Amino acid sequence: MKSVDKAARLFVCVAQKDEIGRDVAKALKQELKNQGLKTRLLDGERCKVRVQTCNCLDLCKQCKKGSGAAVIVYPEGVSYGNVRPRDAAEIVHEHLGEGRVVKRLQLD
């Protein structure tokens, strides 16, 4: 029987014209390290937190106006829009560390 890869994932869209998505992904990875949250509890088990880039999250029309990237946090399925590198610390601390959604960035 195959084991399931238990991991929390932050998917970051990199389909913007500039490099903001890649910069956001780098900032999220750095904040996970800085805040000691490269692993977290998920369903009572410790699991890795992975930051993965992707070409499109299909959130462009719903994303707030601005020059940020879209990010989806799984397994929660929370979507964030207009995320910039400076928002990484807040997302890591609030969402992953404290379990609270960052309302100002959340997409409906």
Image (cartoon, helix red, strand yellow):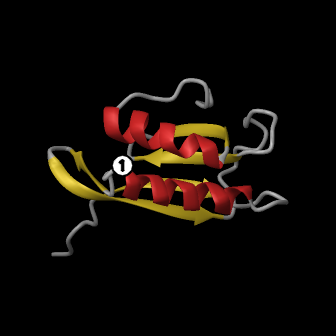
Please tell me which residue lies in front, 7 or 67: 67
| Rendered residue at 62%/54% (across/down) | 24
> Which image quarter is the N terminus in?
bottom left
Left or right: 10 with respect to 23? left
Task: Name the residue tied to disc 1.
Answer: 35
Residue 2: name its quadrant: bottom left
Residue 86: name its quadrant: top right
Please tell me which residue lies in front, 14 or 67: 67
| Rendered residue at 40%/38% (across/down) | 93
Left or right: 63 with respect to 94? right
Task: Pick out the residue farthest to the bottom.
Answer: 1
| Rendered residue at 41%/61% (across/down) | 50
Left or right: 97 with respect to 72? left
Q: Where is residue 8 drawn, in percent x and y?
A: 36, 53
Q: Where is residue 104 drawn, in percent x and y?
A: 60, 25
> Would you place residue 38 above or below residue 35 in this image?
below
Disc 1, SS:
loop
> Which image quarter is the C terminus in?
top right
Number of marks present in the image shown:
1
Amino acid type assigned to the residue bearing label 1 in the image: Gln
> Would you place residue 101 above or below residue 20 in this image?
above
Task: Pick out the residue farthest to the front.
Answer: 34
Task: Pick out the residue farthest to the right.
Answer: 17
Q: Where is residue 68 drawn, in percent x and y?
A: 73, 45
Q: Residues within 10 Å of mark 1 (few under 14, many from 20)?
A: few
Q: Where is residue 84 drawn, in percent x and y?
A: 67, 45
